[in-house]
Image (cartoon, grey):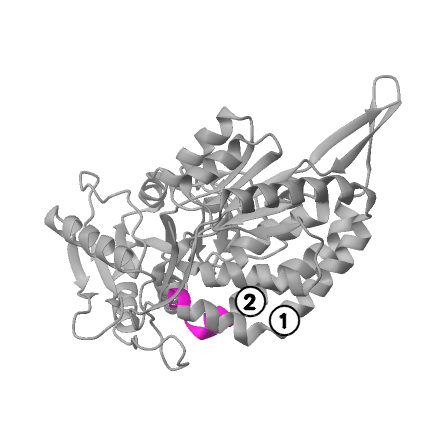
Amino acid sequence: MAYTVTNPFTEEVIATYPKTSFEELERALKQAEDYYFTSKNESVVSRAKKLLAIADLMDSKREELAQTASLSMGKLITQALSEVDLCVEIMRYYATHGPQMLATKPYIYGLRREAFLHYESSGIVLAVEPWNFPYSQVIRVFAPNYLLGNPVILKHASQVATCAQALDDLMSEANLAPGAFKNLFLSYQQVDEVLADKRVSGLAVTGSSQVGQKLAAKAAANLVKTSLELGGNDAFLVLKDADVAKAAHDAVSARLRNCGQVCTAPKRLIVAKEVADEFIKLVTDELNKVKLGNPLEKTTTLAPLASKAGLELLDEQVTMACENGAKVLVAGGKVTEKNGYFYRPVLLTGLEKQNPLYDQEFFGPVLQVYVANDEVEMLSIANDSSYGLAGAVYSQDKVHADELAQKLSTGQVFINQPATSHPELPFGGVKNSGYGRELSDLGLYEFANCKIIAW
């Protein structure tokens, strides 16, 4: 199984990589195991300094890395640059704050007896990562685990094999110790073999719920700890006292980010009836302004989808939703008059519970709007989902917005702003959106051996 990279704008194959051989896989596992043991003799502070050096090197290659991402999966060049910046920010955050987070923590037990909690490395972590954020999804696993001393083996999506190789080359140029990080072009069978290997102790997955369920089951059979960041069908609540113009602008810009291929994008817009007409008009106006084009041109506002398969699936989903009662407020759809996997934005309404697409994730520039009679109905619609990754609440009463946010069944909620990733904040979901947390101190502890020594 070769890894093939196709430019979504030109539809031309730009790179192919052969599958990792058995010998290469075994060599990588052996180097990772060796690194795991030798890293125990290295201080966290020393690794923090190295992490800063990697961040600086990545920053110096910002333009080159961003262009590789744009060519591989169609990301707008401005968004690709922002993703590289986020990677640098994540590494600098852990390098600066991580050593203190890993400091020994005292406990008192019994009749004033002392114990101390030590955070230690636990073993090799396999990272199975998606194409939509080809750098940041990897770095958010690598940075905290490297600080701990856990080696990371990357199995990336075929579509962004160029980005995976670029990361591998970056680590080599930074003189990272052999075994600390390695990209491998693994087959699905080889992933199973890695999870069955006793040297592997952790699995970090970002992807669809279906992929997460399958890999988590295989990991569980081998007692490999897992962290899953899976799909989302996020609710975006607009209350009657919201700044409607801001809410509409944020909803569209966040939904169209990465051409709608974002787990935390606001996919279900749930709007109070008092402001629904105004909100829908503003959203419609914004959707009709998008400019399709070359992702490398800064005047382009909507790039193509990452793959032909993704384009066809999205088109099928919208067709099926409409065949089962959904109404089209903004008619977009698949673009046939030009090359590239382009899909014009679509705004749907009337997706009722009996619609087979009611609780499916549309991974592309498709928005759904629901008009709610009151806040009870808003919360009912928002929580009526098998997903729970992120959400947003818009209201000029921040105290009340916080009250509603606490009633949403999701891993994170943002007030008067769309959901985004920040190194300082825990990231993760509930229900079919997965479990475990990335980023912040929680991401640092996710694959740590939290060892207590009692006196």
Q: Position of residue 357 (x, y in %)?
A: 22, 45
Q: Vertically, is 42 above or below 192?
A: below
Q: Nearer the viewer, residue 333 or 145?
A: 145
Q: Position of residue 370 (x, y in %)?
A: 26, 51
User: Relative to 106, is 36 on the left or the right?
Assistant: left
Give the magenta part as a residue range: 72-81
Q: Quadrant of residue 94?
A: bottom right
Q: Quadrant of residue 254?
A: bottom left
Q: Which residue is mark 2?
A: 84
- What amino acid does circle 2 point to? Val
Q: Which residue is mark 1?
A: 59
Q: Nearer the viewer, residue 369 or 363?
A: 363
- What amino acid does circle 1 point to? Asp
Q: Nearer the viewer, residue 347 or 121?
A: 121
Dividing the image into 4 quarters, which one contains the C terminus? Answer: top right
Within the magenta stretch, is there residue 80?
A: yes
Binning the other alpha carbons within 10 Å of mark 2 as few (below 14), some (14 to 19) or many (20 upward) gives many
Picture residue at 44% right of the left edge, 52% below the top: 130
SS at mark 2 in the image: helix
SS at mark 1 in the image: helix
Answer yes or no: do the residues labelled 1 and 2 have beta carbons within 8 Å?
yes
User: Relative to 220, is 309 on the left or the right?
Assistant: left
Regarding residue 367, the answer to whether it shows in the image is no
Q: Gap between marks 1 and 2, in whole Å?
A: 7 Å
Q: Nearer the viewer, residue 58 or 345?
A: 58
Q: Position of residue 351 (x, y in %)?
A: 20, 47
